[in-house]
Image (spheres, helix red, strand yellow):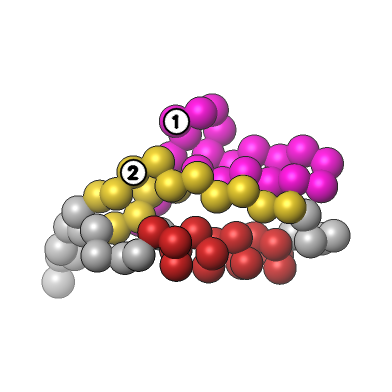
Amino acid sequence: MATLTGVLGEAVHTAPGRVRVELATERGHRVLDVARAVRGAVADAVPGRPSVTVLVTAVVTATPTDP
């Protein structure tokens, strides 16, 4: 995951029993793998193991970090 986005509103939206996460991933990462990893991490972190929807709204090019 590169960053959270907010294309459809807040980047993380919660409702009883549900969580929606909007994010961007970096080019070169398989979108399905990123979405599954985020979904699993959120479901494990939130009490009650809610239904989690992950929307990948962008694919971005990684920028090199400063040394």
Q: Provide the residue span drawn in magenta.
A: 2-22
Q: Is there a contact, CB below 8 Å, between mark 2 and mark 1?
A: yes
Residue type, mark 1 in image: Val
Q: Where is residue 4 in the image (x, y as percent from the top left)?
A: 45, 46
Magenta stretch: includes residue 7: yes
Position of 32 with respect to 39 (left or right) is left
> Which disc number belongs to residue 34?
none
Dot label at residue 7: 1
Please give the name of the residue rendered at 51% of the width and 28% of the height, measured from the top-left corner: 8
Give the residue displayed 75% in from the left and 45% down from the top. 18
Q: In this view, does 25 lie to the left or right of 42?
A: left
**Mark 1: secondary structure:** loop
Q: Residue furthest front?
A: 32
Quadrant (top left, top right, bottom left, bottom right) of the N terminus: bottom left
- Please tell me which residue is depicted at 71% across the width and 40% down the height of the picture: 14
Spatial distance from mark 2 to mark 1, Cα to Cα? 10 Å
In front: 10, or 30? 30
Question: Front-most of 52 and 32?
Answer: 32
- The vertical placement of 29 against 60, above or below, is below
Disc 2 marks which residue?
58
Mark closer to the chain start, 2 or 1: 1
